[in-house]
Image (spheres, rainbow, N blue to C red):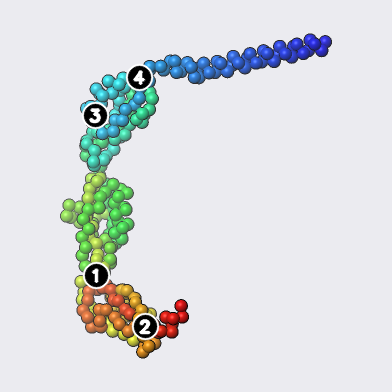
Amino acid sequence: MGNTKDSIKKIAIHIGLVFLTITLLSFIFLKVYLPSYTNHGQTVTVPNLEGYEVSELDKFLSDRDLTYEVNIDSGFNVEAKPFSVLKQNPNPESKVKRGRKIYVTLNARNAPLIKMPNLVNSQLKNAQEILGNIGLVRGEIIYIPDIGINVVLEQKYRGRNIPEGFEIPKGSQVDLVVGDGLGNQILEVPPLIGLDEIDAEFLIIGSGLRMGNIDYAITDTVASGIIIKQMPPAGAKVKTGEPINIWISESKKSSTDF
């Protein structure tokens, strides 16, 4: 009785192994061998079509047993020729069956129109980033006297001021009129010698000027923290926004404490 059970068990194991082997072989045949055999000699490598003009595609692709179709939506690249390929699907170097259709996106003949943003009162750096992000190009930077340093005062296209919302072709150059930080108004430099830094800064800014460099000079005759020199000197005529440099006294004791 025991021998019979062992025999049945062994037979069941062998049948299971045979079934497993057949299943594995069938999987390999159906998923690996058969597809490779079926596609043998039937696949081609997709060429890179970028830059080809649409008139060149028929012969170029038919020689490689491929066809093409133009996408309804076009793109635009100012550096590419009109009706040349910008994008394709499938990608270059893909393996496809012979006769496969390649979908291509062409460069438009005319640039799409872009609505001009409002750059006035923006910093030059920000204005340049905005232009680049929407497909426009920063042209000439024209500096004029204005207290707003590197602040955009006007935006121009082909020499004319253009308002926000005005449509211009993508890739166009936009010239920017920018403040140089110096106004047209002529001012007199106030006297700063004898003041401390806080009072001097208040007086400089209140006079329509701005703080320049601050240097320190060691002296025994003036209390520490007092302005002993300024440039330009008091009474000089300067433009609005011009920097005023000051020298502040520093005692020998405080300089040697470090």
Q: Which residue is mark 2?
A: 218
Q: Which residue is mark 3?
A: 54
Q: Amino acid at mark 1?
A: Leu
* Amino acid type assigned to the residue bearing label 3 in the image: Val
Q: Identify which amino acid the numbered label 2 is placed on.
A: Ile
**Residue 85 locus on image (x, y percent):** 27, 33
Of the image marks 4 and 2, the number of the one nearer the N terminus: 4
- The location of residue 173, given as percent across then percent down, is 22, 50
Mark 3: few/some/many CA within 10 Å (<14, 14-19, 20+): some
Of the numbered discs 2 and 3, the one sitting upstream in the chain is 3
Q: Which one is closest to the eye, mark 4 or mark 2?
A: 2
Question: Looking at the rendering, which quadrant does residue 78 occupy?
Answer: top left
- Dot in front, 3 or 4: 4
Residue hosting label 1:
182
Residue 162: % across, % down: 22, 54
Q: CA distance from mark 4 to mark 2?
A: 86 Å
Please report whichever mark, 3 or 4, sits nearer to the chain's N-terminal start: 3
